[in-house]
Amino acid sequence: MRDRLERDFQRFQREWPRAFPDHVRDTYRIDLTARCLGETIPHPIGKGSGQLSLNPAQLEDDAAAGLAFTVLKTVIAQDETGGRSMAAWAIHETRMKLERRPAADGRPGWSVTWKGRGWDRSLEQYLALVRAGREFTRAGTLLVVPSVKYHLPRLDEPFRDAEYRYTTERLAGAWGEPPLLLEQDFSPTLAGDSLAQDRAQILRWLREAPGRIRAAAPLPVRIAVKLMNARFDDGFQVAMMDATTADTLVCFNRLFDAERKVAYGGWDLSARNLRVLDRWTSATPGLRPGSEPGLCGTGNICSGRMILEYARRGCESVQLHTFFQLPLSEYPAARGARTQRALHALVFHPRDGLIAGLLELETQGKLGRQGGLLRFLDIAAHAHCPG
Ligand SMILES: Cc1cc2nc3c(=O)[nH]c(=O)nc-3n(C[C@H](O)[C@H](O)[C@H](O)COP(=O)(O)O)c2cc1C
């Protein structure tokens, strides 16, 4: 198996098999099937919302590479008059800077520094992108999910239902057949905003906002909430997970650097996220995969091994951003679009890839075969088992 993996790693640097999950099943008897927002997907690796899902050309590359899913850039909700209470998140900024960001323990990691926020074009343009995404999903080449930032009131204010209603109806119109899948974003810049300095206020958003979206949707809807890393302790992060009434939790968006006023990632982000997920899974024994809420991991995922760290804590899929933005010299494959090169490293790297990590779990007796297959989803299934 190890020799075979080494050979595949070399070979796929030159000729990438889009249907790599089939190859992995046939060759290694490993089933990479994963789950995202209740949908079955061929493997766990997707793209997080951001600057890499702004146009159909990016979706085309993702579909061609065989990515499992892409979350579109976050659009800011509006009412029928164009009013947007969260308009401060719709600012235009194009410059991104990839930086080496050392973690608190000194480990060098990557982080993208960027001053922008949400989608800065019109809702009509966003709906056109959603429609383009639906074509890929219907063709079975890429699951594409929109992302929205909705109004979040102060404790003594009501939710602006007109914004929930208008935006959700328009998205449902562009989407077509039910169920509508969507992600609600609670971003790191929100975590740094005065709105998010009150714990009771945040918990109310998480309890009530999914219900507002469901009430606003003309179709059945499945909602993922992308939780921010609030600027409180780990215990509050767990309380946020417990409070939300969404179908899936995306854990967790980037940290906020209050001094530089920018979001950041790297090893501090994954350390925090994994620590909180540990606490949550051990506090919820007996929860089964496929039961709600499903978990999707995000944050400093730069190897197959890191995917498995999130999976061991209950995540049934993962969404990455920074790893798709590295300098080309950082990927072992010397050709192909970035998404393809990233998938090659994440899945086939002989030491740190997903296959190597899964085979190692088998050797260590931590993951058994079912019907001859090692199954990725069995890892998340074990996350909630006591001990
Ligand atoms: C430049 C940039 C823009 C982003 N924009 C959004 C966004 O609009 N909505 C959102 O939910 N997440 C956004 N994110 C967060 C990513 O989707 C991802 O969850 C986060 O960066 C953690 O993953 P990573 O460590 O792989 O980058 C953005 C991240 C970056 C780096």
Image (cartoon, grey):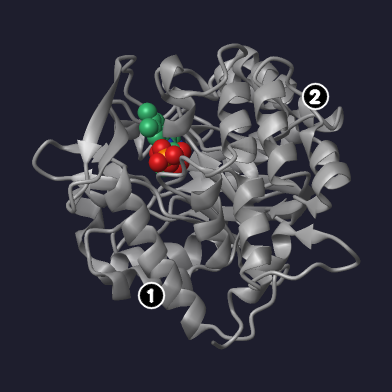
Left or right of 64: which side holds 159? left
Left or right of 176: which side holds 70? left
Q: Which residue is mark 2?
A: 135
**Residues at circles 1 and 2 in contact by the CB criterion of under 8 Å:** no
Label 1 sits on what residue type?
Ala
Looking at the rendered structure, the secondary structure element under dot 1 is helix
**Camera-side residue of 184 and 345:** 345
Residue at (40% x, 18% y) in the render: 327
Where residue 100 sits, quadrant-wise, is: top left
Residue at (33% x, 58% y) in the render: 271
Looking at the rendered structure, the secondary structure element under dot 2 is helix
Mark 2: give few (<14), some (14-19) or many (20+) Cα within 10 Å: some
**Camera-side residue of 203 and 36:** 36
Quadrant that contains the C terminus: bottom right
Please say whether residue 12 is visible from this viewpoint. no
Judged from the image, the quadrant occupied by ligand 1 is: top left
Q: Which residue is mark 1?
A: 239
The x, y position of residue 111, in whole percent, is 30, 34
